[in-house]
Image (cartoon, rainbow, N blue to C red):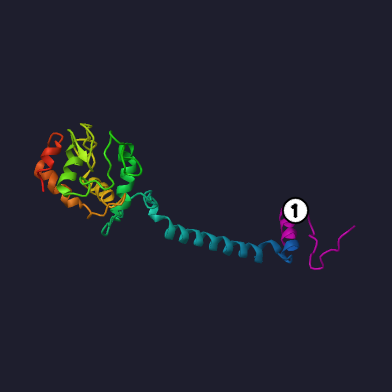
């Protein structure tokens, strides 16, 4: 199929190089340059991607934690402000300590084992002066012991304080508070400050003899 000649195009009179160039310029001078115009779709995509980039940068700036690897460490302490340590209920804490060690001898009921391990339930040693029972846990007990009219011989009570199992003052206070308020006992709590006072007053000491502790009123 032949195309219609451009009415505005005048064929050159000669076929010299200059004539050919002039003819080419005339032939394209009146054509519409569709490729040079802008299209709506590329502009829309440009704005869309620009918006996504702006949103991504804003999001990272707000939630990156300034790229600090410790910002989301739940075990880390706060960098500023006052740190408050939640205080445990001494009875609840003392029960856990009792079940971790004392329960082996004194049993879950606190009744001990007849002839071998003395009871804590209703014990005059448990419910007596705090100064006695603190010394027992801090330094240990060795010698013939009578509890509630029953003789338990010379079964040793090992120390659980700093010189024994290494329990801190707050642990000793908590377990004593528990046994003085469990198994039917109803005696005042033992404070950490009282345990510290006795430990500083006595220092290191060999296991106590029951007769020596009975002198403490």
Where's residue 161, x and y in %?
20, 40
Could one spot residue 37 in this view of the protein?
no
- Which residue: 22% across, 41% down? 149
Q: Is 24 included in the stretch rendered in magenta?
A: yes
Q: Is residue 4 above or below residue 161?
A: below
Query: As drawn, is 18 to the left or to the right of 115?
Result: right
Q: Is residue 129 above or below residue 11?
A: above
Could one spot residue 180 in this view of the protein?
yes
> Which residue was labeled with disc 1?
16
Where's residue 26, x and y in %?
74, 63
- Which residue: 23% across, 35% down? 152
Q: Main secondary structure of the magenta part?
A: loop
Where's residue 201, x and y in %?
9, 45
- Looking at this view, is 56 or 28 the one in front? 56
Magenta part of the chain: 1-25
Where's residue 19, x and y in %?
74, 57
Label 1, residues with CA under 10 Å away: few <14, some 14-19, many ≥20: few
């Amino acid at each position: 199929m032949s195309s219609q000649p451009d009415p505005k195009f005048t064929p050159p009179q000669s076929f010299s190089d200059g004539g050919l160039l002039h003819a080419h310029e005339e032939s394209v001078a009146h054509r519409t340059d569709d490729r040079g115009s802008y299209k709506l779709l590329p502009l829309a995509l440009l704005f869309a991607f620009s918006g996504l980039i702006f949103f991504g940068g804003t999001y990272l700036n707000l939630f990156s934690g300034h790229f600090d690897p410790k910002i989301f460490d739940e075990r880390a302490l706060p960098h500023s402000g006052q740190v408050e340590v939640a205080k445990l209920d001494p009875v609840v804490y003392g029960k856990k300590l009792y079940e971790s060690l004392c329960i082996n001898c004194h049993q879950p009921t606190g009744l001990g084992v007849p002839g071998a391990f003395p009871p804590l339930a209703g014990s005059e040693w448990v419910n007596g002066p705090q100064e006695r029972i603190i010394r027992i846990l801090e330094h240990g007990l060795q010698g013939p012991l009578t509890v509630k009219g029953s003789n338990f011989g010379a079964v040793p009570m090992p120390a659980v304080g700093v010189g024994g199992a290494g329990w801190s003052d707050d642990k000793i206070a908590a377990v004593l508070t528990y046994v003085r308020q469990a198994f039917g006992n109803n005696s005042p709590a033992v404070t950490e400050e009282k345990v510290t006072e006795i430990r500083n007053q006595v220092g290191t000491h060999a296991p106590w003899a029951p007769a020596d502790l009975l002198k403490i009123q």
